[in-house]
Image: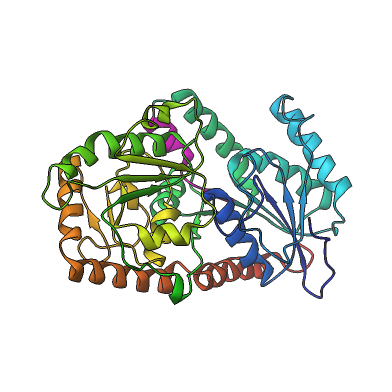
Amino acid sequence: MAEFSNTSKKPLVFIVPIEPRNTGNGLAMRAGALCQAAARLYDVKVVVVPVSGTPPPVGRIEGLSTLVLPVSDILNKETVRRDELLADRIVRSVPLDHGSPIFVMRSYLSGVALGVAMRLKSRWIGLDLDDDDETFAVSIGDLRGARQIRETLSRVLPAFQIVTASSPFDAQAISRRYGKKVETLVNTVSIPVESTIRRDPDRSVMFIGNLTYPPNIDAVLRLVNDVLPELRRMPRGETSKALIVGPFDPRGPLRVLSGRDDVTLLGFVDDLDALYRRAGVVVIPMEIGSGTRIKVLEAFAHKVPVVSTPIGVTGIDVRDGRHILIRESPFEIARSVSDLFGNENLCHTLSSNAHALVLEQYSDIAISSAFSRICLEVEGLVGPTG
C-alpha cells in the first residue's frame, strides 16, 4: 500500500471495488486505467472497498496512492446502513480535503460515494457504471436484480455530474432509459513491446477470462463442447486443442473439463505474453454479456487473430473481415478458425489492422484524453468552490 502523496495537483478521491491492476482481471484493469487517467490531472487518492474480491497478485501499479479499506465487519449490514458506515470509515481513514471531487466505480458503490461527497461537500461527483447491468440482468432472466438496479440508478443518477460507461452502446441505452447524459470511457490495454508479440503460433484455440463470471463459463463450455468438435473434424483442425486460461472454481461447472485430452484448463497464469505468443486463434463464443471484453483488446494488442460472436465484440469499433472474423454458429466459428490456420496472409492482415486499432482507440492515451476532457468540462461548470 502506497502512502498518499502531496502534490500541487487538486485532490480527487477515487472509490473502486477492487484493487487496480494493469493486467489479470478485467474490472481491476479498468480501475487501473481510470485511476491512472485521473492521476494525469489530479492528486488521486484511491480507496478500495473490496466488494469484488481480490485480484491476482500481478500487475500492481507503481506509484498509485492506494488504501484498501477493511470492510468484513460491515458488508452484511442493510444497504443504507452499510453505505453510511463505509462513508464514515473512508472519511476517518483517509486524509481528504474539503470540497474534493469524488469518482466512483460501479453502481453498487454509488451510495458510499454520495455519503463521502456529502461529508466533504464535494464540488462534483462522478460515477463509472462500466456496463449496462440492468440489461444484462434481464438477459439472464434475473428480473428482480434488474428491478433493483433500476431503482438504485433512478434514485442516485440525478446527484452525479458525470456518468460514464465502457461501451458507446451501453452509454446510449442508459442515457435513453434515465434521461441522463452518459459519456463513454472505453476499456483500454497496455501495448506490449514488439519482442513479446506472438511468434510461431500453434493450432490451438484460446479463451482467457475470469472463469467465475457466468457468461465466460457459458462461452468456455460452448467452445469446448460445440466449437472444438467441429474444428477437429476439419482438415486443419484435427489436432487442435483448447487452452482455457483464468481463475475458476474447481468444484464449479468447469470441473468436467479436467479429464479431457483436447482441453488444457490452465487456471490463473501470471505470464500471458508466453501464451499469446503460442496461441493460434483467440475464440470468443459468447452468447450473453454486457460492456466490452478487455481480453479481445488484449489479443489485438498481441497480434493474435480473433474469431468472435457479435456479443463478444459489442462496444468495440471493429469491422468483420478487417480486424476480426465475426461468426454466430459453432460450425461457422470452427470453419473460420480452420481458414485462419491455413491462411497466414489473412492472419497477418487481421492482426495488423486490429493492433493498429488498439493503438489508435484503446490505448492509455485514448482514455486519458477522454477522462481529462470530461473532468475539465465539469470543473468549468462548477467552479473552484462548487
Percent of width and height locating residue 197: 41, 69
Res. 378 in view: no
Residue nearer the viewer, 199 or 301? 199
Q: Is residue 198 magenta?
A: no
**Hey, which residue is sitting farthest left in the picture?**
235
Q: Is residue 130 magenta?
A: yes
* Highlighted range, magenta: 128-140
Percent of width and height locating residue 385: 79, 65
- In the displayed structure image, the side of residue 219 where residue 117 appears, left or right: right
Residue nearer the viewer, 278 or 322? 278
Residue nearer the viewer, 31 or 114? 31
Quadrant in the picture for residue 297 = bottom left
Percent of width and height locating residue 353: 29, 71
Q: Residue at x 58, y 35 (%)?
A: 152
| The C terminus sits in image quarter | bottom right
Q: Residue at x 55, y 57 (%)?
A: 23
| The N terminus sits in image quarter | bottom right
- In the displayed structure image, the side of residue 181 where residue 13 appears, left or right: right
Against 31, residue 153 (above or below) is above
Q: Residue at x 61, y 37 (%)?
A: 155
